[in-house]
């Protein structure tokens, strides 16, 4: 099921979906009499592709996810749980892996993806603000190479985090697995959950389903360019498409998790 989902998900990304729509329309135009239908699908694919390429559109779409949880201010951590959890009682900072590069010939800090780097940096920042806390790094083995958590720990160690302050969870292979393997570690103790801002809504729902109530600490929020209406931003670009892909992937993940009864 894991491999099937990973194979099918890209088929419904904005770029793939638009190409599929336009290809279907071209087939109708070239090999059938349904000329109006063919033109409709070609036009639809083109319109969706162009709109998805504008950050003004795709960025706002992504913000519908990112705006659900604000960045964590440690000084306000107790208010996250209605005042029941004092800041100095938080012993765990959980960092969800966001992928690895897979090329072990690269320096270790480049062997993790951009999203893993952003999450790890925020996790280490919070860990240092909470004396006595420990980092829980998650992520099992994907298709090749060591477990994601292992690679993250090597980067964290280079950044000054001692091995004794890290706990590695190397069994999970997908977001839905994280709470299953984190629960035996944290038990009933409060903990902070660090992941990408766009990924946080799904992660929080999955943890809640397992009876856990983490304090959300989203990282890597998208910010509009300072000169939003500059000439360069008036044209479609790859950055816009990437934002659309992230948002679409998360909404598909939420839908899949809901259908499977995981949230």
Image (cartoon, rainbow, N blue to C red):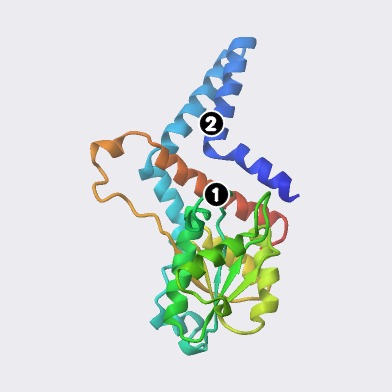
Q: In the picture provided, is 50 more to the left or to the right than 168?
A: left
Earlier sequence position, callout 1 versus callout 2: 2
The residue shown at (72%, 56%) is: 260
Residue 154, located in which quarter of the rendered image? bottom right
Give the residue pinned by disc 2. 18
At x 57%, y 34%, the residue is: 17
Q: Residue at x 49, y 74 (%)?
A: 161
Which numbered circle lies on residue 63?
none
81 to the left or right of 225: right
Q: Work out whether 75 lies above or below 207.
A: below
- Marks 1 and 2 in Cβ contact (< 8 Å): no
Q: Classify mark 1: helix, strand or loop.
A: loop
Percent x, y for residue 210? 68, 72
Task: Give residue 156's position: percent from left, percent from top.
Answer: 50, 68
Residue 11 in the image: state x and y as whole percent: 62, 37
- Image quadrant containing the C terminus: bottom right
Q: Residue furthest front?
A: 105
**Badge 1, how many Cα within 10 Å: few under 14, some, many 20+?**
few
Closer to the camera, 228 or 191?
A: 191
Task: Return the residue at label 1.
Answer: 105
In percent of width and height, residue 24 lies at 61, 22
Q: Secondary structure at mark 2?
A: helix
> How many numbered marks are there?
2
Left or right: 208 with respect to 106?
Answer: right
Q: Looking at the image, is mark 1 or mark 2 nearer the viewer? A: 1
Quarter of the rendering containing residue 10:
top right
Q: CA distance from mark 1 to mark 2?
A: 36 Å
């Amino acid at each position: 099921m894991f491999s099937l989902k990973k194979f099918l998900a890209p088929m419904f990304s904005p770029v793939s979906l638009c190409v599929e729509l336009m290809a279907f329309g071209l087939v109708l135009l070239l090999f059938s009499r349904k000329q109006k239908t063919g033109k409709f699908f070609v036009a639809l694919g083109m319109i969706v592709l162009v709109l998805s390429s504008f950050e003004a559109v795709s960025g706002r779409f992504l913000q519908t996810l990112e705006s659900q949880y604000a960045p964590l201010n440690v000084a306000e951590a107790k208010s996250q749980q209605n005042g029941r959890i004092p800041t100095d009682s938080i012993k765990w900072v959980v960092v969800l892996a966001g992928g690895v590069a897979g090329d072990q010939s690269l320096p270790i800090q480049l062997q993790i993806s951009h999203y893993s780097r952003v999450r790890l940096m925020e996790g280490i920042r919070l860990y240092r603000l909470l004396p006595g806390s420990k980092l829980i790094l998650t992520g099992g083995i994907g298709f090749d190479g060591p477990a994601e958590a292992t690679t993250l720990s090597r980067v964290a160690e280079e950044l000054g985090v001692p091995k004794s302050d890290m706990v590695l969870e190397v069994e999970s292979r997908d977001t839905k697995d994280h709470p299953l393997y984190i629960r035996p570690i944290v038990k009933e103790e409060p903990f902070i959950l660090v992941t990408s801002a766009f990924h946080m809504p799904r992660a929080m729902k999955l943890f809640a389903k397992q009876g856990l109530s983490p304090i959300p600490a989203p990282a890597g929020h998208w910010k509009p360019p300072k000169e939003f209406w500059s000439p360069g931003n008036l044209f479609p670009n790859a950055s816009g498409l990437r934002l659309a892909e992230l948002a679409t992937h998360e909404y598909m993940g939420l839908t899949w998790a809901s259908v499977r009864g995981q949230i």
